[in-house]
Image (cartoon, rainbow, N blue to C red):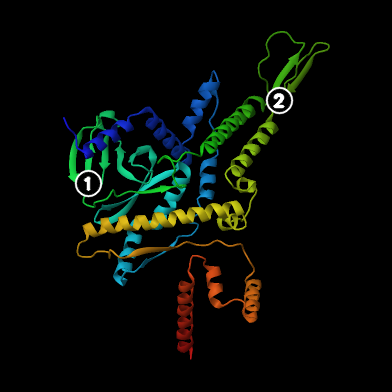
């Protein structure tokens, strides 16, 4: 039988999904998601079973370092971005604002930022559902991707759908190419096929960093290893406190067994006999020192200050952590550049899906998305900042446009001028209304 190119891609993608390497990759992604979402107890039990003869005597205990660190690293959307439609009409802007509200775009992109930090890459898919446009954030534990010469040249995407019954023979796969959508059964046979109405694969890949040699960007293993080491030591600490934290009564010189007694009980001890209460020296401090060391290493190795994982109370915000921290500032700048491109790419996909399902109310093909990301700055006394600006304005070394650009570096000089004109018009309007 001679297969077409599309059929070859479907078969190749399914066969790749069945490889042990891909199964391991998906299991690793599922584990990271479990760690992030507080499902760690079962993994601790597996660790205990490898090291202890009676693991059932120990109580799993964990503190979620993975989520704490990932949420501190994923700072692109420390506040939601400002999105406007350029080269379009007012109707385009109105439609897009409607889409933003319907699909919770800001929340979904913030989640995509966090999951990309956690997993290396995720897919964001615009989908028409319940007569509205929605966004799905799809993780690598259910994804298989076929690429061309570069990781960004995506030829097909396959999503695994697991049934609620848990039966393996009820697993299905959704396979997308620019030409067609196919539903496969658990053996890879096509059970449903239709043309792709959008003409493109409706998935936007969101990477944690620019991919080079592979679609699946590696990394982040150190965080998983530190989380497991912390869980193990914390569980050990509970066991130490249970087994060595209580004293044990003893009697010397008496024959026979001695049962437990109540306060006020008297004993006739032989000469030289002794009655007492012994307590072991549990290595609690050593365990606490080890836990604190792991906390600091987890923070520093991921570009965070050691104080970010301290238990001491602090009012330091996410903005304060970024501003003034050169490593985090640089990391966020790189991430913002990436996500500006992702949002524009996603906008084009959203337009295709929206226009197909709304032929009488379409977004203009010439419309493009402009994204203005929030710029965190160190806390500066407003009076001092205003005094500095007044002095510089008086010396003639800056203009009001420079101040606007300093407050919002994402604006070009022309955009800053337009914003200044807008502010001045608003000021005149309010002055006229108060006269």
Above or below 32: residue 316: below
Q: Quadrant of residue 27?
A: top left
Judging depth in this view, the residue of 206 and 131 nearest the camera is 206
- Residue sitting at the far bottom: 435
Mark with earlier residue (1, 2): 1
- Residue sitting at the far right: 271
Above or below 421: residue 160: above
Disc 1 versus disc 2: nearer the observer: 1
Q: Position of residue 84 (x, y in %)?
A: 38, 66
Q: Residues within 10 Å of mark 1 (few under 14, many from 20)?
A: some
Secondary structure under tag 2 reads loop
Q: Are marks 1 and 2 in contact (CB under 8 Å)?
A: no
Q: What residue is rendered at 32% in x and 32% in y?
A: 16
Asked whether residue 432 is in view, the answer is yes
- Residue sitting at the far top: 255
Q: Quadrant of residue 159?
A: top left
Q: Which residue is mark 1?
A: 179
Q: Quadrant of the N terminus?
A: top left
Above or below 37: residue 253: above
Horizontal side, residue 57 vs residue 354: left or right: right
Q: Position of residue 255 (x, y in %)?
A: 73, 8
Q: Position of residue 32 (x, y in %)?
A: 46, 38
Q: What residue is rendered at 43% in x and 37% in y?
A: 29
Secondary structure under tag 1 reads loop
Residue 263's label in the rendered image is 2
Q: Position of residue 60 (x, y in %)?
A: 53, 31
Horizontal side, residue 374 vs residue 17: left or right: right
């Amino acid at each position: 039988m001679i297969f077409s190119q599309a059929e070859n891609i479907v078969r190749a993608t399914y066969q790749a999904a069945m490889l042990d390497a891909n199964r391991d990759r998906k299991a690793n992604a599922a584990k990271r998601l479990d760690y992030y979402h507080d499902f760690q107890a079962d993994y601790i039990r597996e660790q205990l079973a490898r090291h202890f003869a009676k693991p059932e005597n120990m109580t799993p205990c964990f503190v979620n370092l993975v989520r704490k660190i990932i949420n501190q690293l994923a700072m692109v959307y420390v506040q939601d971005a400002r999105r406007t439609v350029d080269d379009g009409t007012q109707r385009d802007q109105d439609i897009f604002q409607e889409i933003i509200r319907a699909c919770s775009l800001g929340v979904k992109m913030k989640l995509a930022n966090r999951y990309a930090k956690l997993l290396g890459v995720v897919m964001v898919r615009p989908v028409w559902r319940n007569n509205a446009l929605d966004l799905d954030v799809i993780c690598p534990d259910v994804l298989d991707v076929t690429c061309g010469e570069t990781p960004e040249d995506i030829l097909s995407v396959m999503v695994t759908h697991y049934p609620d019954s848990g039966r393996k023979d009820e697993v299905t796969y959704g396979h997308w190419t620019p030409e067609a959508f196919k539903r496969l059964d658990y053996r890879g046979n096509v059970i449903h096929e239709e043309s792709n109405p959008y003409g493109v694969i409706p998935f936007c890949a969101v990477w944690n960093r620019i991919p080079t040699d592979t679609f699946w960007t590696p990394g982040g293993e150190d965080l998983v290893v530190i989380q497991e080491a912390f869980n193990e030591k914390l569980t050990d600490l509970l066991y130490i406190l249970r087994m060595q934290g209580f004293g044990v009564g003893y009697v010397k010189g008496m024959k026979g067994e001695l049962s437990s007694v109540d306060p006020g009980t008297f004993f006739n001890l032989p000469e030289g006999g002794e009655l007492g209460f012994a307590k072991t020296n549990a290595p609690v401090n050593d365990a606490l020192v080890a836990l604190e060391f792991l906390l600091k290493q987890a923070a520093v190795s991921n570009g965070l200050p050691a104080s970010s994982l301290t238990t001491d109370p602090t009012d330091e915000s996410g903005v304060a952590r970024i501003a003034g921290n050169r490593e985090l500032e640089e990391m966020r700048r790189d991430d913002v550049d990436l996500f500006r491109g992702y949002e524009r790419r996603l906008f084009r996909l959203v337009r295709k899906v929206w226009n197909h399902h709304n032929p009488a109310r379409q977004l203009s093909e010439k419309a493009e998305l402009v994204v203005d990301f929030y710029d965190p700055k160190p806390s500066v006394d407003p009076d001092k900042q205003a005094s500095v600006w007044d002095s510089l304005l008086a010396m003639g070394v800056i203009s009001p446009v420079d101040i606007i650009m300093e407050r919002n570096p994402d604006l070009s000089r022309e955009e800053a001028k337009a914003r200044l004109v807008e502010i001045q018009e608003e000021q005149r309007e309010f002055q006229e209304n108060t006269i």
